[in-house]
RNA sequence: CGGGGCGUGGCUCAGUUUGGUAGAGCACCUGCCUUGGGAGCAGGGGGUCGCAGGUUCAAAUCCUGCCGCUCCGACCA
């Protein structure tokens, strides 16, 4: 490709809207342009990168027996109503009506479609396992699209669905995908880590997220330095903190004026914060939910939602809490409230003689004890893991990190097949629901995540495997006919042997072309100038290291392939 | 959803307080000159000042409503 013909409009200043590195560089280097909030047009360079990522994904999916299909983006409402998710998905779903006023949505994911599809065609255990996947645009009307391609409303996703006859089959399919994902992200040059994850709106149980490690990531993970435990903090389980034996005392209601925070209460009563219990009030589809954890702990809303069996959960307003018979700042565990669900952290159940609110403005109880003074509706692990906690598996030291979720794998079991009556017949002629899994990769997000991990002040640094082009040939002086001729020859030679090359044939000064090459991030740059024109050797600059190497005439191809293989 | 900021040529922004014929840098076009890290000179093209109303002799500027973008928050009683 000749740069003069390439639609890669580089700019000196990135638009002010770009906050994170990947967004800034994708705009500056002429890879993407914004069409609407969270919706982007991919220009030729970005599209080449995306196609390479897709190709890696295809190869690894096919290697595991996956078969590529293409399902519709526009999906009828009925199948979503049948699965119960038309309501659950909420505002995140783009909805539309056709001319007959029938409801549709733009596919945010395809469990309903694929399950309905397979239901119609799979009758027998002989047809299983079945792994179907596609790569296409997905649509999610995010509350707050941001960070360019990292959180868009339209994005490219690979989604594979596995259909097995039983749990053992699902485990095997899940393992295949887990392994394939590890290979895919490694081939894309990402530093990543698989972590245990919550399964969220997709449902099912058993899930891992693949996190590209980056400080701009929105997800937080913890991992153990001693064993292989690694989890999203939303998911990370915790063991209950052991009981400390202590004589129980009688509860007592005490005045605590102006002490609406745990800190204030503990200071006022001169009690260590570990002997207090605090509450967070939520509203859910099941009414008001109060979650209780030790004063120095934090509530994990995802765990509360799962424990309470709720579909939605958000912070309750003060009026809602008062209507439930409690008082913001003084919420407690003792009986007397109405229509509330009490969810208590299992560590609280091991505490003795603790302080908690009295559900009345200005009062707390001291010497509260589980079993005697209150009865929770649910007791479970509902707190957020902290870096100071011991590893829940081995007791080792934990480390926190931030990550970009580039992929997630789920065991769906029979959640969708039962709702949509997708069954097969086993050897005994007995009808059984298909056992399903689903597995997603954010292809466009992978591209952005790679940039988050691999760039410098000058621009992007592409790993060779997904670089839009491998080599940029830059003649220093466009007016020098000899240099241009040599550059043409090099370009033709490399292109002829399948090395993807851009010839920067623009009549620009050298600095401009060098800067653009760095910005776009070709792994290698071949410079053709007065120095190199004389002797027939190739001057190659490595983008990642800045190192310059020379290849004598006749050995170009080998040298370039050798260098690319190392990148 | 709540709160802040912004909307002026392709990009970055000034001009708005105090109304009076729309500006700069970069980018773009032509020519000269230059050519190993975003040169220089000269000439030139390009803007419904987000949209719709209103006030006024006169509105980018004041008023009202809408739209869009963006950042923060959704932190814990």
Image (cartoon, grey):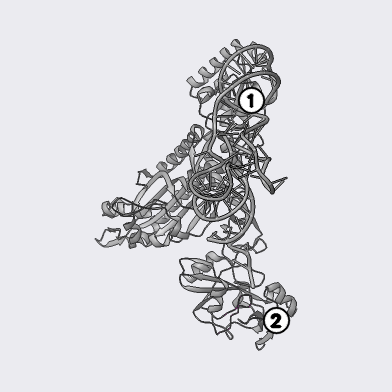
Q: Tag 2: Cα neighbours inside 10 Å, few (<14), some, or many (≥20)?
A: many
Task: Pinpoint residue A239: horizontal percent, then vertical percent.
Answer: 59, 68
Relative height, residue A486 to residue A433 (above, below): above
Q: Residue furthest left?
A: A429
Residue at numbered disc 1? A512
Relative height, residue A374 to residue B36 (above, below): below
Relative height, residue A132 to residue A396 (above, below): above
- The residue lying toward the viewer, choosing from B53 and A162, is B53
- The residue lying toward the viewer, choosing from A277 and A22, is A22
Q: Which residues are magenta?
A: A326-335
Residue at numbered disc 2? A256
Q: Is residue A445 visible?
A: yes
Mark toward the start of the polypeptide (1 vs 2): 2
Predominant SS along the magenta part: loop
* Residues marked 1 and 2 touching at CB (< 8 Å): no
The quadrant of the image that shows the C terminus of chain A is top right
- Assign a secondary structure to mark 2: loop
- The residue lying toward the viewer, choosing from B54 and A127, is B54
Q: Is residue B40 left or right of residue A3?
A: right
* Chain on which label 1 sits: A
Marker disc for residue A493: none
**How many marks are shown on the rendered structure?**
2
Task: Pinpoint residue A225: horizontal percent, then vertical percent.
Answer: 64, 55
- The residue lying toward the viewer, choosing from A166 and A446, is A446
Q: Residue at x 56, y 78 (%)?
A: A322
Q: Is residue A332 magenta?
A: yes
- Assign a secondary structure to mark 1: helix
Q: Is residue A130 visible?
A: no
Task: Pinpoint residue A475: horizontal percent, then vertical percent.
Answer: 61, 18
Q: Residue A95 occupies which quadrant of the picture?
A: bottom left
Q: Residue A373 occupies which quadrant of the picture?
A: bottom right
């Amino acid at each position: 490709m000749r740069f003069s013909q390439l639609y890669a409009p580089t700019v000196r200043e990135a638009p002010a809207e770009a906050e994170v590195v990947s967004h800034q560089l994708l705009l500056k280097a002429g890879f993407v342009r914004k069409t609407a909030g969270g919706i982007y047009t991919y220009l030729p360079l970005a599209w080449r990168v995306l196609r390479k990522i897709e190709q890696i994904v295809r190869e690894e999916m096919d290697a595991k027996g996956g078969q590529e299909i293409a399902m519709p983006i526009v999906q009828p409402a009925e199948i979503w109503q049948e699965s119960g998710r038309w309501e659950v998905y909420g505002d995140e779903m783009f909805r539309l009506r056709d001319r007959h006023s029938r409801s549709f949505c733009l596919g945010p994911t395809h469990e309903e479609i694929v399950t309905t599809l397979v239901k119609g065609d799979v009758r027998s255990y002989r047809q299983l396992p079945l792994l179907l996947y596609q790569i296409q645009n997905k649509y999610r009307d995010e509350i707050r699209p941001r960070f360019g391609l990292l959180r868009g409303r339209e994005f490219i996703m690979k989604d594979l669905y596995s259909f097995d006859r039983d749990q053992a089959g699902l485990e095997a399919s899940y393992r295949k995908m887990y392994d394939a994902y590890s290979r895919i992200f490694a081939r894309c040059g990402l530093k990543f880590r698989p972590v245990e994850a919550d399964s969220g709106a997709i449902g099912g149980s058993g899930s891992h997220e693949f996190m590209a490690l980056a400080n701009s990531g929105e997800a937080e993970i913890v991992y153990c330095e001693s064993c292989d435990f690694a989890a999203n903090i939303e998911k990370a389980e915790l063991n209950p903190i052991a009981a400390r034996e202590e004589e129980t005392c009688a509860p007592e209601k005490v005045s605590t004026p102006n002490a609406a925070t745990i800190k204030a209460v503990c200071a006022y009563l001169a009690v260590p914060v570990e002997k207090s219990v605090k509450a967070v009030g939520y509203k859910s589809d099941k009414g008001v939910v109060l979650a209780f954890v030790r004063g120095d702990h934090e509530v994990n809303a995802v765990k509360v939602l799962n424990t309470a069996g709720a579909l939605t959960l958000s912070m309750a307003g003060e009026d809602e809490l008062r209507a439930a018979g409690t008082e913001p700042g003084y919420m407690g565990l003792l009986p007397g409230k109405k229509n509330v669900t009490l969810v208590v952290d299992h560590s609280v159940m091991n505490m003795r003689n603790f302080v908690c609110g009295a559900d009345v403005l200005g009062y707390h109880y001291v010497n509260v004890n589980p079993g005697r003074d209150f009865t929770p509706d649910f007791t479970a692990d509902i707190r957020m893991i902290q870096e100071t906690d011991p590893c829940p598996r081995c007791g080792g030291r934990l480390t926190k990190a931030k990550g970009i979720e580039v992929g997630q794998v789920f065991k769906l079991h029979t959640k969708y097949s039962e709702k949509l009556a997708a069954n097969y017949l086993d050897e005994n002629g007995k009808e059984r629901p298909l056992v399903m899994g689903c597995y997603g990769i954010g292809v466009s997000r992978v591209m952005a995540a790679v940039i988050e991990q691999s760039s410098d002040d000058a621009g992007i640094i592409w790993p060779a495997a997904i670089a839009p082009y491998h080599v940029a040939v830059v003649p220093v002086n466009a007016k020098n006919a000899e240099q241009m001729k040599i550059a043409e020859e090099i370009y033709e030679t490399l292109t002829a042997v399948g090395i993807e090359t851009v010839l920067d044939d623009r009549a620009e000064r050298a600095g401009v072309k060098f800067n653009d090459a760095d910005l776009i991030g070709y792994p290698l740059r071949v410079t053709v100038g007065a120095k190199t024109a004389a002797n027939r050797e190739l001057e190659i600059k490595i983008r990642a290291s800045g190192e310059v190497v020379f290849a004598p005439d006749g050995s170009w191809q080998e040298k370039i392939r050798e260098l690319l293989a190392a990148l």
